[in-house]
Amino acid sequence: MNIVLFDEPATRIQLLPFTFTRPAAKIRIGILTIDEKWNRWLESQPSYLTEEYLTKKFPARSAEDNLLINGALCPDENLTNALKNLRPGEGLIKNGSRLALRSKSANLNYFDKADLQEYAGDITLIDQVWKIFQHNAAQLRIDFKLITAGRNSNGIDDKHTIVYNEENIFTEEGVTTKAAVLNAEDGPIYLGKNAVVQEGALIKGPFALCEGSHVNMGGKMRGDTTIGPYSKVGGEISNSVIFGFSNKAHDGFLGNSVLGEWCNLGADTNTSNLKNNYETVKLWSYTKSGFVDTGLQFCGLMMGDHSKSGINTMFNTGTVVGVSANIYGDGFPRTFIPSFAWGGASGFSTFQLTKALDTAQKVFARRNVLLDDTEKEILKHIYESTSGNRIWEKK
């Protein structure tokens, strides 16, 4: 079967700002992105049904026999077996949400003609941004078993690194550790290919450090945390997900937060993840164009791709930052910062597209990645489509 991961339109909006630049299936949760999970569970490389402006980078592939799967849906053994047993024209739903469909065409309209059955099992559907960190610990454990099954760890060969419950620690080829503490008593620790753990780092599982990423000297990784590939982190991080190619290299606290790709948090940037009155956190909703109650007592920063903060930036509880925003200055900026905003608590102006593209090109070059015309067109679309959120432009 041809696997196609589709963006449910309502869910895609709820997952902004992260789905501005990617299909929902490209969200990282646990060790892997959702599409990487399905690739392993179904042993097939998926394609994507997503917004038109993303299709050049993330094209759909159709065949005579297609399995369409909700791109925000995380696989497990029972769900995978149920999908394999679908016959042409059959689909699965759960509490009104479309989960999957076996169809002769990669077209969501075929759901209207399908024999839809209510799936009886439990599911993990990432249909809100805060569910990325909320379900990260559980997904870390699932991915750890999936990735390490039948394989041997490369082990820890540094005599000055202290490990607890070493059988729950897996290191890929090229991993380096120096005088660190790795505690996997409460959950697994995964260190990806060529990952580096520097002197004095403290790591508590569940935790994943993906390929080519670094935990800097003295970094405190408090568990339930994923650091995606080619990122550098330091300071204190708790129950957070960094998708990849992003840096939080210096001191400062990041908790119950999600950072996209190509982000950078300046030295001593701090996020609040708990309100002083201990009330539940409200978060900006692109669906509502207003704030919604997450029902969570702990919720920090949601930052879209290409956004940056200057040194000593303070983010209040439940802050949402769009794509290509640049935040700096003293005081707490507002808790919704639109895409291509430039400024902070004292006010914002617009980060003009030409300058934003120039910055992105320089950042890509640092990782030997080309900012091609496809990437530029995506950023241009986001710049134009989010202008309504930059209320200062209307004055």
Image: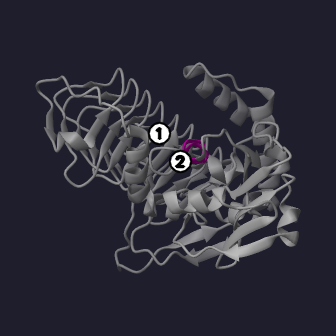
Residue 25 seen in render: yes
Q: How many marks?
A: 2
Instruction: Name which residue type carries label 1.
Output: Gly
The residue singled out by tag 1 in the image is 228
Residue drawn 30% across the image and 43% down it: 189
Residue 16 seen in render: no
Question: Front-most of 395 and 292?
Answer: 292
State if disc 1 and disc 2 touch (CB < 8 Å): yes
**Quarter occupied by residue 338:** bottom right
SS for dot 2: loop
The residue singled out by tag 2 in the image is 28
Residue drawn 30% across the image and 52% down it: 223
Quarter of the rendering occupied by the C terminus: bottom right
Choose the circle earlier in sequence order: 2 or 1: 2
Instruction: Name which residue type carries label 2.
Output: Arg
SS for dot 1: loop
On the image, the x and y values in percent for residue 323 come to 65, 48
On the image, the x and y values in percent for residue 82 come to 61, 63
On residue 200, which mark appears? none
Label the magenta part by its dominant secondary structure: helix
On the image, the x and y values in percent for residue 40 come to 55, 42
Mark 1 Cα shell of 10 Å, populated few (<14), some (14-19), many (≥20)? many
Q: Classify 334 as above or below 161.
A: below
Q: Is residue 93 magenta?
A: no
Q: Disc 2 versus disc 1: distance between alpha carbons?
A: 8 Å
What's the magenta region?
Answer: 35-41
Q: Classify 42 as above or below 278.
A: above
**Quarter occupied by residue 348:** bottom right
Residue drawn 36% across the image and 36% down it: 150
